Image: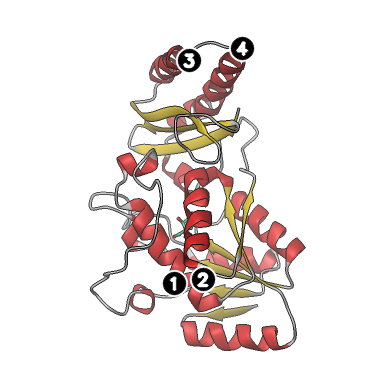
Amino acid sequence: MNVHKTHQELRASIEEFKAQGKVIALVPTMGALHEGHMSLIKAAKGQADIVVCSIFVNPTQFAEGEDFTTYPRDEAKDIAILLDNGADIVYIPSVEEMYPEREEITEPPIKNGDILEGEFRPHFFRGVGIVVTKLLHQCAPDKAFFGQKDYQQLSVIKQMVKSLGVPVEIIGCPTQREEDGLALSSRNNYLSVWERKIAPELHKIMQEMAEEYRQGTPVEIVCEKGKRKLLAAGFAKVDYLRFCDSQTLLPEIKSSARLLAAAWLGTTRLIDNIEV
Ligand code: PAF
């Protein structure tokens, strides 16, 4: 497995594989790798010859006061995990490598980046859009893999890539869960023992909400009840708990519905989404 720190090294290595006719897959991550990331690597290995995994905690998608400095980082452990799981290339750029110009004037073409997550983290999709555009440019993969756990992120990236005409296929992979239903996330590391016990309630309550929705209970009633249940379970605050169109993510449901949620357990913000 090759470990590259600069985009020139990465590109040289990828050009060699491309010259041999190999299909390249990129799995962008922020490290702190878990089984959810491994499922992306596995899917990528099934659909490409060479799997590149990038590890970069992207400062532009964190706002002041968010967890950029405390975000879990363990490069040696991540590299060992990737080696074990058969990744071919690891790309670990520095902040200077990714952002050589201190002034970032880039505005990625993002649609609906101000709803749901964007309402509560207004900087987030701009930062994700910038870094994903840079990574796609540097790596030039044929396919790129993202988890459905970040459903809105996946949707924003698909639309951005289409709008920019980037020649890459964006592939969404199912959310991986603990046995008790908690969606795998690097931020689960922040949960105390007590919070970890409560955390699966988010998925459980969302499933109950989806069932009530299917039975025809009005959306407002389902959402109000869901919110009350979360607060009663021990969640400190609910940012959103909404049924949206699975394609547009708007409240008017034209195709199928998707339930998206973000809620705080102590100082940890959990997000999740399910098909309805
Ligand atoms: O989902 C993530 O881990 C990040 O948002 C991503 C896509 C790697 C961009 O930094």
Looking at the rendered structure, the secondary structure element under dot 4 is loop
Query: Would the CB of label 3 be found within 8 Å of ligand 1?
Result: no
Q: Which amino acid does label 4 sit on?
A: Gln
Q: Which of 216 and 10 is in front in this view?
A: 216
Q: Which amino acid does label 1 sit on?
A: Lys
Q: Do the residues labelled 3 and 4 touch (CB within 8 Å)?
A: no
Looking at the rendered structure, the secondary structure element under dot 2 is helix
On screen, residue 100 above or below 194 = below
Q: Are marks 2 and 3 in contact (CB under 8 Å)?
A: no
Identified at 41% across, 19% down, the residue is: 227
According to the picture, the residue beneath numbered tag 3 turns out to be 222
User: Which class describes the residues within 10 Å of circle 3: few (<14), some (14-19), or many (20+)?
Assistant: many
Query: Would the CB of label 1 be found within 8 Å of ligand 1?
Result: no
Q: Do the residues labelled 2 and 1 touch (CB within 8 Å)?
A: yes
For marks 2 and 4, give the CA distance: 43 Å
Frontmost of labels 1 and 4 is 4
Identified at 53% across, 69% down, the residue is: 166
For marks 1 and 4, give the CA distance: 45 Å
For marks 2 and 1, give the CA distance: 6 Å
| Quadrant that contains the N terminus | bottom right
Label at residue 215: 4
According to the picture, the residue beneath numbered tag 2 turns out to be 136
Between disc 1 and disc 4, whose residue precedes? 1
Between disc 3 and disc 4, whose residue precedes? 4
